[in-house]
Amino acid sequence: MKVHIHLNVDHEKKMLFESLKEVHGKTFTDILEEGLDACLSEIVPSKLMEEEIAQTRSRLMELEQNLVKIRMIEQQRKLQNKAAKKEDSIAEDYLEIMRNQRFEESRDSLFIQWKRLDMNWPRIVDLFQFKNATEAKAWFAKKMIGMEL
């Protein structure tokens, strides 16, 4: 935590310091903190070390809290992914049942069309709710092989 300090500094030293800022690249705060650190390390190095340990512990606690938040977010994502997969699985199961019912309703005519290579794939894709003709052809191939045996 930083606090605001009001200082009185010799005007000429201030002007010289500011004119050399491009060379040293430091602010008054930087210089004051460096001086305080040097002074404290000579006078009471143990106190300086205790302060550094306290700051490190504070940062560690902050990181641990962030880790807990991140783990919670990861867990939520896993649960959402599981739920989405379950929904996909339910949808796939429903589609498979529906496709099998529709197939059984028109089994003989579909078999004849298959043998004649006269399948209307755009209509089949729409009627059986496939993503595309390739998926429909693969599904029908499995069904027709089972019928031919």
Image: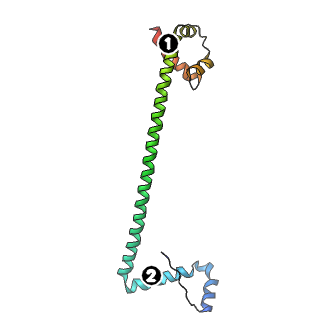
Q: Quadrant of residue 83?
A: top left
Binning the other alpha carbons within 10 Å of mark 1 as few (below 14), some (14 to 19) or many (20 upward) gives: few
Answer with mark 2 or mark 1, whichever residue precedes in sequence: 2
The spot of residue 10 in percent (x, y) is 59, 92
| Residue 61 sits above or below residue 86 on the image | below
Residue at 37% of width from left, 80% of height from top?
47
Q: Secondary structure at mark 1?
A: helix
Type of amino acid under label 2: Asp
Q: Which numbered circle lies on residue 147?
A: none
Query: In 3D space, how far apart are the residues under numbered discs 2 and 1 (Cα atoms)?
Result: 86 Å
The spot of residue 69 in percent (x, y) is 44, 55
Q: Which numbered circle lies on residue 104?
A: 1
Binning the other alpha carbons within 10 Å of mark 2 as few (below 14), some (14 to 19) or many (20 upward) gives: some
Farthest-out residue, left:
46
The spot of residue 89 in percent (x, y) is 46, 30
Type of amino acid under label 1: Glu
Q: According to the image, label 2 marks what residue? A: 37
The spot of residue 63 in percent (x, y) is 42, 62
| Residue 133 sits above or below residue 77 on the image | above
Residue at 50% of width from left, 20% of height from top?
98
Q: Secondary structure at mark 2?
A: helix
Residue at 60% of width from left, 21% of height from top?
126
Quadrant into which the C terminus falls: top left
Residue at 50% of width from left, 77% of height from top?
2
Q: Quadrant of residue 57?
A: bottom left
In front of the other: 119 or 3: 3
Q: Quadrant of residue 66?
A: bottom left
In front of the other: 118 or 26: 118
Give the image's coloring scheme: rainbow
Instruction: Left or right? Give the position of 101 relative to 61.
Output: right
In front of the other: 7 or 29: 7
In front of the other: 82 or 44: 82
